[in-house]
Every structure is written in C-alpha cells, then in structure tokens.
Image (tube, helix red, strand yellow):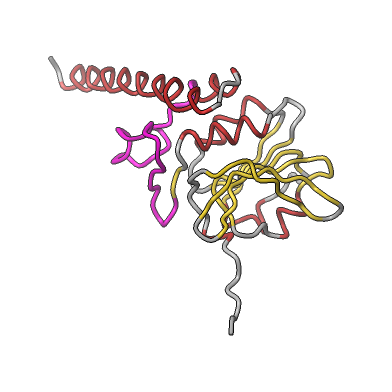
C-alpha cells in the first residue's frame, strides 16, 4: 500500500467514525432533550462539526460539552446549538446575524435556513454589522449585557437568541424589542460558554 493509499484509507475510517458520532449526537443528545424539529436535525446532521474545532479536539467534536477554540473562547455543546436554532425558528425571509465566538460552525448550520446571513466576530460588532437591521440575531455564547450596537441592530419585529449570564448561572434566552429596548425571556438553564466581550462593566461597591 502506498503512502497516499494509506492516508486515504485512514481518512475514510476517520470519516466513518465521525459520521457515526454525528448520528449519535442527533439521537442521544438532541432528540432526547426536546430538539426534534426536522429542519434542525437535518442541518446539524449535514455539517461536520469536527471541521470547526482545533485538530486536537476533532475526536471529541460530538461530545456533550463545550470545546476550547483557543484565546479563551469555546464552542458550545451540540445541544446548545440545537436549542438555539430551534428557538430561532429561522425562515427564508430572515436577514440573520451570527455573533461569532471564532468558529463558523453555527453559521454553517444556519446558512441554508435563512434568506441572508452575516457573520461578525464578537470583538467586531462596532464596525462589522453592515446589513442591519436584522430580523434574527443569534449570539454564539453567553453575555452579561447586550451591547447597544446589537440592541439597535435588531429589527422592530425581530428576535435575538443568546445565552445570558447571571452570576454563576447561564440561561438560554429569547429577546424581542419592546419600544427601544430588547427584553429577554428566559427559556431554561443550560451551560453556555461566556463571551468576555459582553461582560458587564465592573461597578464599585461599598
């Protein structure tokens, strides 16, 4: 067997293993936790999650926990993404924004489900949002406070899906505009990695 043939064979075995892991993610993590919308399951079955994590984490791409991406950022667990997309209820009429944690995984899951999609890194929202207002915003992580830029970027009838940090607890939330302010409604507690860019300012206490 040549080196090329060996490499191809190893890749085929690895690909089959990842395919099995992806199916197990669908059946054992998503379906059993209430993520059952066919469009969500199909979208997450289509995207190879292992392509969006560092090489050292490829074998762990489908485990039910967040994975380090480097620079203090993390890819949320598959269940977080499944619940986010299901709560977002995307349509082909949506002009969507993903606030990214450095990985494009969630963007690739969402892209075929919306009319248009822009991806902006969490550190670049002050200059990167060029298609506002958006009917759908998904923040790929948990925030302590919603920046004014994102508040203003949401269309009047739009919605935001994100994680919200309250002390040591993170909750999945859905936000909608009330007058000029986005108000969040909690959906449930779930572990979501926090985005340092959206930490609340430190306040003096006496």
Task: Name the residue located 60 percent from the left edge and 56 percent from the top edge.
Answer: 124
Position of the N terminus by quadrant: top left
Position of the C terminus by quadrant: bottom right
Residue at the outermost top position: 1
* 30 and 20: which is toward the camera: 30
Task: Name the residue located 45 percent from the left edge and 38 percent from the top edge.
Answer: 77
Residue 72: image location, x then y, percent = 42, 56
Residue 29: image location, x then y, percent = 44, 27
Residue at the outermost left position: 1
Q: Is residue 68 magenta?
A: yes
Segment tinted magenta in the rendering: 45-73
Q: In this rendering, would 205 be left or right of 91?
A: left
Residue 155: image location, x then y, percent = 81, 44
Task: Name the residue located 59 percent from the left edge and 44 percent from the top edge.
Answer: 172
Figure check: 21 above or below 99:
above
Q: Is residue 21 magenta?
A: no
Figure check: 39 above or below 165:
above
* 154 and 181: which is toward the camera: 181
State the count of labels: 0
């Amino acid at each position: 067997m040549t080196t090329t043939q060996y490499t191809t064979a190893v890749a085929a075995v690895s690909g089959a293993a990842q395919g099995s892991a992806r199916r197990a993610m669908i059946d054992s993590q998503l379906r059993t936790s209430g993520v059952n919308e066919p469009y969500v399951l199909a979208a997450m079955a289509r995207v190879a999650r292992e392509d969006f994590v560092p090489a050292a984490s490829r074998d762990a791409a489908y485990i039910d926990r967040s994975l380090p991406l480097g620079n203090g950022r993390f890819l949320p667990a598959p269940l977080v993404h499944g619940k986010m997309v299901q709560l977002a209820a995307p349509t082909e009429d949506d002009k969507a924004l993903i606030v990214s944690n450095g990985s494009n995984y969630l963007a690739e899951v969402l892209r075929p489900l919306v009319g248009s999609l822009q991806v902006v890194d969490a550190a670049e929202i002050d200059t990167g949002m060029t298609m506002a207002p958006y009917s759908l915003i998904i923040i790929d992580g948990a925030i302590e406070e919603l920046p004014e830029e994102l508040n203003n970027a949401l269309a009047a009838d739009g919605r935001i899906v994100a994680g919200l940090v309250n002390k040591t607890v993170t909750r999945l939330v859905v936000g909608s505009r009330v007058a000029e302010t986005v108000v969040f409604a909690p959906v449930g507690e779930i572990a979501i990695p926090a985005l340092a860019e959206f930490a609340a300012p430190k306040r003096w206490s006496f």
